[in-house]
């Protein structure tokens, strides 16, 4: 069995299959739990895969040789968000001013709060640079972090935690605030929690999903501009 596992663990197809299987199991558990936010399928899949890698002693680099095929599809999936956004284009035009205001406030708040907390705890400049773009989608956040002298690995982890946290808390939090406008709900979670939040928004309402995609894209561009400026001010 050890020899068989040694052979299989080197095959990219094994880890691609494990990734897809973990997500399907997470999705089934999510539906069985009545689509409760804490049963987020992406979160469950990550926990299952992390446990599997730990128990089998598999390095992440080996796992990623197979999982990179799923990683590649992040680009096309992001582009596909333009389709529901196009369907809601008249709504976007009517809400242009609130969208711009919410974008600026949300982006600045996301950067300033994490830098203020890190600065208060005396974290070094490299860690602050890694944390600053955490509310942008992963590809943009990692690029910004590298330009600022941060750690791409730490940035990726921060982006992941931000997205998962947002996807878990967004529905109960906005319900508690009594926010009923799907445009506002979707845009807020897209700005704050990028891809994970957008996926959650689509699960709840198609209009919310479209505006979440808009928020994710616009915040990625604005974060690339504002993060270096705000970080320089803190330093």
Image (cartoon, rainbow, N blue to C red):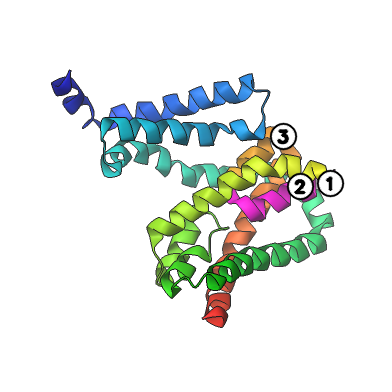
Residue designated by label 3: 204
Residue 57: horizontal and vertical position, in percent? 26, 35
Residue 195: tell me if it is visible: no
Describe residue 131's horizontal placement relative to residue 71 as left or right.
right
Residue 47: horizontal and vertical position, in percent? 45, 34
First-in-chain label (2 vs 1): 1
Q: In this view, does 98 lie above or below 84?
A: below
| Disc 2 from disc 1: Cα separation | 7 Å
Residue designated by label 1: 179
Query: Residues in magenta?
Result: 179-194
Residue 4: horizontal and vertical position, in percent? 17, 20
Q: Which of marks 3 and 1 is in front?
A: 1
Q: Is residue 223 above or below residue 66?
A: below
Residue designated by label 2: 185
Q: Residue at x 59, y 72 (%)?
A: 226
Residue 166: tell me if it is visible: yes
Disc number for residue 42: none
Q: What element carries label 1?
A: loop
Q: Residues within 10 Å of mark 2 (few under 14, many from 20)?
A: many
Circles 2 and 1: CB atoms closer than 8 Å: yes
Q: Residue at x 42, y 58 (%)?
A: 154
Q: Quadrant of the N terminus?
A: top left
Residue 61: horizontal and vertical position, in percent? 27, 44
């Amino acid at each position: 069995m050890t020899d068989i596992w040694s052979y299989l663990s080197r095959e990219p197809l094994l880890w691609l299959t494990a990734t897809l299987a973990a997500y399907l199991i997470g999705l089934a558990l999510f539906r069985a739990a009545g689509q409760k936010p804490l049963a987020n399928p992406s979160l469950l899949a990550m926990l299952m895969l992390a446990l599997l890698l730990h128990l089998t002693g598999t390095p992440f680099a080996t796992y990623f040789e197979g999982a990179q095929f799923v990683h590649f599809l992040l680009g096309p999936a992001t582009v596909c968000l333009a389709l529901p956004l196009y369907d809601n284009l008249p709504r976007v035009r009517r809400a242009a001013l609130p969208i711009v205001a919410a974008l600026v406030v949300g982006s600045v708040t996301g950067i300033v709060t994490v830098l203020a907390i890190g600065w208060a705890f005396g974290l070094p400049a490299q860690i602050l640079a890694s944390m600053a773009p955490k509310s942008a989608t992963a590809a943009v956040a990692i690029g910004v972090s590298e330009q600022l002298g941060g750690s791409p690995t730490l940035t990726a982890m921060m982006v992941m935690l931000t997205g998962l946290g947002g996807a878990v808390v967004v529905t109960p939090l906005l319900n508690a605030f009594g926010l009923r406008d799907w445009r506002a709900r979707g845009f807020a979670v897209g700005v704050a929690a990028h891809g994970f939040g957008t996926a959650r928004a689509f699960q709840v309402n198609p209009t919310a999903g479209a505006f979440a995609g808009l928020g994710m894209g616009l915040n990625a561009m604005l974060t690339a501009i504002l993060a270096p400026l705000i970080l320089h001010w803190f330093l």
